[in-house]
Image (spheres, rainbow, N blue to C red):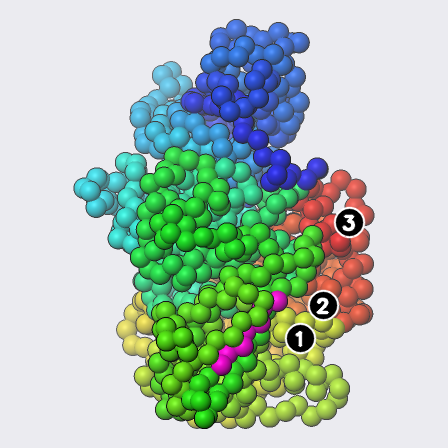
Amino acid sequence: PQPVRLSDYRPPDWLVDTVHLDVRLHPTATRILARLALRPNPEGREGSPIVLDGDELSLKSLTLDGTPLAGNAYVATASALTVLAPPQRALTLEIETVVDPSANTKLMGLYRSSGAYCTQCEAEGFRRITYFPDRPDVLAVYTVRIEAEREEAPVLLANGNPVESGPVEGTSRHYAVWHDPWPKPSYLFALVGGRLERIVEEFVTASGRKVELGIYVEPGKAGRAGYAMDALRRSLRWDEEAFGREYDLDVFNIVAVADFNMGAMENKGLNVFNDKYVLASPETATDADYANIEAIIAHEYFHNWTGNRITCRDWFQLCLKEGLTVFRDQEFSSDQRSRAVKRIADVRLLKSHQFPEDAGPLAHPVRPDTYREINNFYTATVYEKGAEVVRMLKTLLGEDGFRSGMDLYFERHDGDAATVEDFLACFAAAAGTDLSQFALWYAQSGTPQLTVSGHWDASARSFRLDVEQTLAPTPGQDEKRPMVIPLALGLVGPDGRDMPLLLDDGTNAGRGVLTITQPRQSFVFRDVEHRPVPSLNRGFSAPVKLVSGLTTEDLVFLARHDADPFNRFDAGQSIALAHLVEATAAHRAGHPLPAPDALVAALGATLGDASLDPAFVAQALSLPSESDVAREIGGDVDPDAIHAARLALRRALGEALAPALEEAYARHALAGPYSPDAASAGRRALRNAGLDLLAATGSAEGVARALAHFERADNMTDRFHALSVLAHNAPLAREAALSAFYERFRDDPLVVDKWLALQAQIAEPGTLERVRALAAHPTFSWGNPNRVRSLIGSFASINQTQFHRADGAGHDFVAEAVLELDGRNPQVAARLLAAFKSWRALEPVRRSSAERALRRVAAREGLSPDVADIVSRSLD
Ligand code: B3K
Ligand code: ZN
């Protein structure tokens, strides 16, 4: 397909005011009658034909204002319906199409999951249901009538409010009519029909409106929807309190389905979810699952304002809804849990997913300016870096400036299909500042590097910081301009306390944030009595790679004393990362590995500090991942050497810290029934981090402790964590534990997913064979995205040593899997292929095997646009 360019944007020629859909559900032949009230757009091109998008559609009938159109008055293909010379006035088209939901393996448009009918329309799925101007700047009011066999689909849902329902007289069928008063783009359309069970609660909004909250799940699973309901209720309340946003319909429904291409979808008033992010019970879900459910329920709900009431003008503006909504869900989780720990987790995710994307062939700006397949742009860059850009805006403008900008955005653009420029203009106006340089964060891809050095002048009692920013070229962007970088910092004195920040011009470094705008800048602080240790980029105030030149002693000091919890955590990680890079090089050179004394000192202090939140300590104990180390090394990467270095470090820490880890393990044992709250989860996380390091030593006690933990566990967090400790550290105890786990949960697909994912991550040469065998296991299905992501996705994106096997068999296997999947579900296939994104950073042997595998994919005839796009950018 031809690339689409932002610079080619033109307003639609025709607008749609109302849509009436009449949908007769049938397993293989669902009939859709669409009545569209169209009118020429005064801002479009005069006299233009009506061009409607389609995808694998066949037209059954077509009328204009009630009269069938002559065969020469229109052209209908599978991908478009063109009315050639329509009267240039308001008119009504009635379009009849028939689709086969049972044959829809792409899971876009109308499809079936466990027998139920459901839809997914973002980004371009509505055109698989009916011909339509399927673009986000065409907003219409929808009325939907759904009809189905009562037996097959007793529940019938669509967007908006229920209007009427009843039997279809004289038949075994029934119907329901839904009306959504809020104009919306077609990508927010949804309908559901099926045999579903519901939990329901009433919510009263701030202004006293009553809203019925419903969560629909497969029969028998309602008992696992309670936590999602609780999270939903808290989300509605939080958006009122934190952003002044109220819900705007009489009902809010969530439907959980087992077959879903991503996490969830924010359809107006009818969110459809991957059931992985709805269903939870202590026996089946881990603390991490609970936290994800809370965050995703919130995220989709928050889209009601940032995405639905204000939508995107075109798909280039995707970050306008996604980055902003991720920022909002991060803030929600921070308020519900520990802000510091949430920030640590978010930055870990950003560094592990977005930084490599930004450093490889798939790098693209937060707002891309060209795409061939929009579904490939639901990326860590658009979502997570997009959220960081909003966070920087808040840091730069301050709490009040940011809130005024948001208020203005909601006021000015409610009902609009808006752009990034519209969004920034609200903040510029509200805060009276110029944001044109800041806007480069949306346009320039790549991770800026900030090199900072500090110089203390004892006689002048001053401290100078020299700051240099650079941004390396990325695909399509050879020249870069300097960015606006909010650098939050503190100067930590010898007593561990922050010193006052007085710039030499007498001004206070406002709120502890320096604003970097130039390639090179210096800042001089006065009245600095002692040599400080600068704590830079506090709270990760900007998504940059910081090169600070701090010594290991400085980092150990910050790990003990920094008042900023993020930097306190990060200091320990920096020590670990530097150690791992050095140890990897030593391993490759056949030299003895260095001793991790500094890290032992830092972590020993952290473990010994009873004032710290256990969840924080658990984060501190969890080392940078193998791919974090690979990213830090940057090129000529040997995953086996990284693995060996990391394993040796875990062993050394387990040995050196054994007494403290054992003590923490004992002290944080919880009594009483499982509760998913953040404090309890933090204690479990700390115990489990200890369990892991103690077992990494390979000692009999370490393994026995993990085995006992596994056998005594009364919740999935403990049970699964112990299983994973055994799987990674205790080859002899592993198989029995894995089969016991499987036997216990074999009928629970979401738990079986954990079992699949864990086995795919074992860093041993036998894993590839194991994964092949599991792909043939009756529990696996290429048709279910959760199964595929658990088994094949985990192997490719987490198991660095086995995916990147030196003999190339891992690369070949994933390439084959991509090709196998592509005929069935291109979106899932393309996502899997993106696991190759850092292939150029590998050492030469693995690098050429990755390239061979990519070329094999590229050579296949008839690739989907999704896979063709990823493979061609990967090889560019
Ligand atoms: N907006 C959806 C993602 C749609 C992905 C389409 N390929 C979920 C979300 O971000 O909330
Ligand atoms: Zn979203």
Q: Residue at x 61, y 58 (%)?
A: 481
Between 107 and 299, which is closer to the camera in this rendering? 299
Span of residues in magenta: 464-470
Instruction: Name the element at disc 1.
Output: helix
Residue type at mark 1 is: Ile
Seen in the image, is 154 located left or right of residue 237? right
Between 412 and 467, which is closer to the camera in this rendering? 467
> Which numbered tag is attached to residue 633?
1
Image height of 694 relative to 60, above or below: below
Image height of 421 relative to 230, above or below: above
Q: Residue at x 41, y 53 (%)?
A: 433
Which of labels 3 and 1 is toward the front?
1
Name the chief secondary structure element in magenta. strand
> Which numbered tag is attached to residue 383?
none
Residue position for label 3: 858
Residue position for label 2: 841
Seen in the image, is 394 located left or right of residue 797? left
Counting residues from the N terminus, which is met first, the one under dot 2 or under dot 3?
2
Expressed as whole percent of the image width and height from the top left, the position of residue 72 reads 66, 9
Image height of 286 relative to 860, above or below: below
Between 525 and 619, which is closer to the camera in this rendering? 525
Counting residues from the N terminus, which is met first, the one under dot 3 or under dot 1?
1
Question: Is the C-beta of the residue carrying label 2 under 8 Å from the nearest atom of ligand 1?
Answer: no
Residue type at mark 2 is: Ala
Residue type at mark 3 is: Ala
Expressed as whole percent of the image width and height from the top left, the position of residue 695 reads 52, 84
Verify CB contact (< 8 Å) between mark 1 and mark 2: yes
